[in-house]
Amino acid sequence: MSVAKNKRSAKELNNSVLSTPTKPSTKVQKKEVDDEVVEKKWDLESLFKLVESMNKKLDKLESIEAHLKHVDHDITELKHSLSYMHDTTEELKLKQTSYDDILLKNEEKIGSLEKLASTLKEELIDLRARSMRSNLMFYNLPENDEENPEKVVSEVLEKINPEFKKMEIERVHRIGKKRLGSVRPIVAKFLRFKDKELIRKNSKKLKGTKIGISEQYPK
């Protein structure tokens, strides 16, 4: 009776041990599966978000790369432009140097020509002065179309000194353009320089008249 009871008790205990964990074990496994599903779901969502983020970053990267290519193109064009400008500048510098040399040579030529012109002018003035050495200018002598300039001068000389009327005159004429209301002076070239000087020194005897006498100078 006691053994049978113990056997029954052992059997019941065994059944109790075997049967009792069955239900809780199913719940644990289900919870673990649910947790795993949830975890996997979260992992997938995280993965999707990560992929989406990476795609956005890739899009931005592609945009940046395209922009950088455009910038590189602009830089290349700028380099070409700068290179062309540099070449053009160097060419202009060479031309400017050439022009400066030409200008310097021309300035030297102009300087030489100016010196030559000045020398020639002085020589011309000297020649004209020499050619006028025996000339006298007579002013304020009445002028008319039928006059004889040599006779007019001779009359003036006679007023200074009757003997002066005999002095020989090489050439005589009025100078300048004829103008209404004005009297042109008469220039007379005497054959002898000493006669011209004698007349000039005695021209003060005409004081009180409107007649004036002076030497002729080159302009």
Image (cartoon, helix red, strand yellow):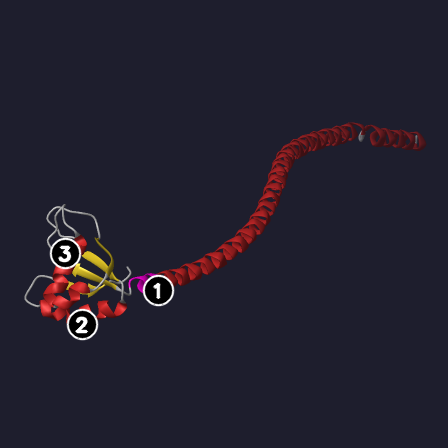
Is residue 47 rendered to the left or right of residue 71? right
Neighbourhood count class around disc 3 (C-alpha, 10 Å): few under 14, some 14–19, many 20 upward? some
Q: Where is residue 207 in the image (x, y as percent from the top left)?
A: 8, 68
- Residue 93 magenta: no
Q: How far apart are marks 1 and 3 (CA)?
A: 30 Å
* Front in this rendered view, residue 127 or 219: 127
* Quadrant in which the N terminus appears: top right
Mark 2, secondary structure of its residue: helix
Question: Which residue sits at x=61%, y=36%?
Answer: 70
In the image, what residue type sits under mark 1? Answer: Asp
Does 189 appear above or below 204? Answer: above
Q: Are marks 1 and 2 in contact (CB under 8 Å)?
A: no
What residue is shown with label 3?
Answer: 152
- Specify start and end residues of the magenta stretch as a single range: 127-132
The mark lying in front, picked from 1 and 2, is: 2
User: CB of mark 1 within 8 Å of CB of mark 3?
Assistant: no
Q: Which residue is drawn at 33% across and 64% down?
A: 130
Instruction: Tell me which numbered mark, 2 or 3, is placed earlier along the sequence.
Output: 3
The residue lying toward the viewer, choosing from 162 and 17, is: 162
Q: Give the residue at mark 2.
A: 201
> Is 113 on the left or on the right of 190, as rendered?
right
Residue 171 image offset from top left, x and y in percent: 25, 56
Residue 157 in the image, given as x and y percentages of width and height: 14, 64
Q: Main secondary structure of the magenta part?
A: helix
